Amino acid sequence: MAETDAAAAQQPPQIQMRVLGQFIRDMSFENVMAQRGASGDVQPDVNVQVNLDAKKRSTDNQYEIAIKLNITSKAKGMDDVLFVFEIDYCGIFHVEGVPNEQLHPFLLIECPRMLFPFLRRIVSDITRDGGYPPLNLDNIDFMALYRSELARQQAAAQAEQKADA
């Protein structure tokens, strides 16, 4: 019996994650080319910027995760903007069993991975409905995104320390 208790004490807690809800907080699709009355076949050059945000909610173990995309499509070789698409897509998650030191990366890596397929579908549908070929976003490596943001923050902190010295 004592061996069973010792083995249970050594095992890490079971991680549980549930998506409680998903929603679009804000969305804007500006079809610049159509507003100008222009049409025709153009090769798009698409720029996608991704921002992530995580907030603790008032309910225990609940977090709101937001993926913010800013997509600009220009005609290749020109500065003519075809469309601008901005969306804040959010999910409410119930997360338990994640150690505190691992919670921040968990929320900004694993939770966005769960939301991304739904967000990709929305982007594809909206661009298609806007008169363009569906924009099928490539997978986003949220771990690499998290690591690059950490590196950027550390570099900024070091630069600030050097400036203060």
Image (spheres, grey):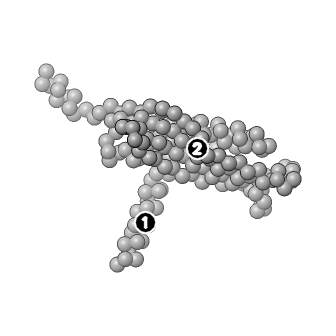
- Is the N terminus in the top left, top right, bottom left or bottom right quadrant? top left
Pointer 1: what residue? 155
The 10 Å Cα crowd at callout 1, few under 14, some 14 to 19, many 20 or more, is: few
Quadrant of the rendered image containing residue 32: bottom right
Q: Which mark is residue 25?
A: 2
For image coordinates 46% across by 47% down, the residue present is 54
Q: Front-most of 77 and 62?
A: 62
Side of 113 relative to 128 (left or right): left
Look at the numbered disc 1 and give the secondary structure of its residue: helix
For image coordinates 39% across by 38% down, the residue present is 59
Q: CA distance from mark 2 to mark 1?
A: 32 Å
Q: Which mark is residue 36?
A: none
Look at the numbered disc 2 and give the secondary structure of its residue: strand
For image coordinates 22% across by 28% down, the residue present is 8
Q: Position of residue 70 (x, y in %)?
A: 63, 52
Which three-letter amino acid code belongs to the residue tagged 1? Ala
